[in-house]
Image (tube, grey):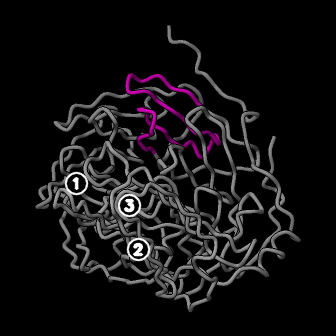
Amino acid sequence: MRDPLPRVPPDSVDRGRPVTLAALFAFAALTTGVSAQTFTEYPVPTTDSQMLGITGGSDGNIWFTEQLGKKIGRITPAGVITEFTIPGTLDSPKQITAGPDGNVWFSDFISVGRVTPSGDITRFQIPSSSLPEGITSGPDGNIWVTLSSRDFQIARVTTNGAITEFAVPGVVQLHAITSGPDGNLWFTDPNGNHIGRITTAGSVTLFSTPQEVTGPYEIVSGPDGNLWFTSAFHIGRITTAGVITLFPDFGGDFPRGIAAGPDGNVWYTESVGNNIGRIGMDGRMAEFRPPTALAGPLDIAAGSDGAMWFIESGKNKIGRITTGPCTPGPTSLCLNDGRFQVDVAWRAPAQGTSGVGIPVRLTADTGSFWFFSSSNVELVIKVVNGLAVNSRYWVFYGALSDVEYTITVRDAATGAVKTYVNPSGRLASVADTDAFPAVAFQAAGKQTEAVLPAAESAPDAPVRVRDLARTRSR
């Protein structure tokens, strides 16, 4: 007999510290500007295709589903679209994910489909004929899918198409699923207001969301080692221990799709409000309005080009938004919401060698560089928002090496550059609290920001401010 399903009550909820409206206005007086985002839109050839899911493929392209078009689409970073017709009948593609085998996989009417990079499609029928919904690549090298059946709610699919189904006891109706940082799978139950966890062996735990959460919908692993999810009026964060923090969507525009970005933030869509949103790991939020009215953005995914790609269901387009003026690269580190680009060049004259530092992002504001080996960190650096203190951005770095190196920090918002030189033989650290002024610049499109939940995390340029006092702890 199966053990009773563990259920965690909503008492294990952390709603952060309250923020008063007065505090927000005070910080608004100190702020000056945020990173500009650029939108690009690409019409899909098939008319009224009703796209639903989107993902970045291992081939460097973006892949998406067309439910009414009964096709799988592929778009290159340059915007070239190719569509592949799904063979057979009873086809209704929904969500899509990159697989561990170099292919992309999608949930279909009563099957799971596999698409090779060249567009060859194979479908595997669910034994119980359940309707698949969410889909993700698991930590065990398999594909995992949520199902709508009353008897079986989660399926595991090998890359050869062998399917095992698992029951989730209780009255649930599952939707999204993602691979967690803890080696488990995490899923949403919109009807029962749960976030669920299933081990690769099939053991399930449900975590009840607090009463103000309505319908947790999409879920993703964040860059901070937690899970992030959307609901009707909140962005939520849940730790692998089940502690939930809520961040009210200050526009109240029904967040839907959600994805981790290459900039260390989490990005989400608002289909009703027609916005693309961004939330930092400190709870700072911003919203950006696509150029097309009533675009109806749904799902969103990170691309190989450092941008976020999303579906515009209302206008039958694929949208692209840059994550910031600084795009992280193999030798460049982007810090403080992508505003500052950091590069390091080093020299070892005694050895006759030189090179560039290889960055490793640690937090939204902090990163490290290694020179000779990835196991040997030479330098740690951070760019801090000190506007509330002296209206400047601060640069701090800590030396773990006496090698000669030059740090170049560029403010991508203004073009200003600061250079820090460490001569050979010196082991020193620097705190520059006068590094960059808070200079405003013209941002592309509509932008709004709010601070959630801590008042000291002041945004750069709030356009719309709301009382966030409901962000509280219990």
The amino acid on which the numbered mark 1 sits, given as a three-letter code, is Thr
Q: Decide which of tag 3 and tag 1 comes sooner along the chain.
A: 3
Query: Of discs 3 and 1, which sits in the foreground?
Result: 3
What's the magenta region?
A: 177-206
Q: Is residue 414 above or below residue 331?
A: below
Residue at screen point 21% across, 31% down: 162
Q: Which residue is under mark 3?
A: 53
Which of 343 and 137 lies nearest the eye of the viewer? Answer: 343
Q: Decide which of tag 2 and tag 3 comes sooner along the chain.
A: 3
The amino acid on which the numbered mark 3 sits, given as a three-letter code, is Gly
Q: Residues within 10 Å of mark 3 (few under 14, many from 20)?
A: many
- Residue 190: in magenta span: yes
The amino acid on which the numbered mark 2 sits, given as a three-letter code, is Thr
Q: Is residue 77 left or right of residue 29?
A: left
Q: Which residue is under mark 2?
A: 408
Residue 389: percent from left, percent from top: 75, 71
Q: Which residue is under mark 1?
A: 89
Q: Residues within 10 Å of mark 2 (few under 14, many from 20)?
A: some
Q: Please tell me whether mark 1 sits on a helix, a strand or a loop.
A: loop
Q: Is residue 118 left or right of residue 68?
A: left
Residue 202: percent from left, percent from top: 42, 24
Residue 313 visible in image: no
Residue at screen point 44% across, 76% down: 419
Specify the farthest residue to the top.
1
Calculate the distance from the C-alpha at mark 1 to the C-alpha at mark 2. Answer: 58 Å
Residue 205: percent from left, percent from top: 56, 27
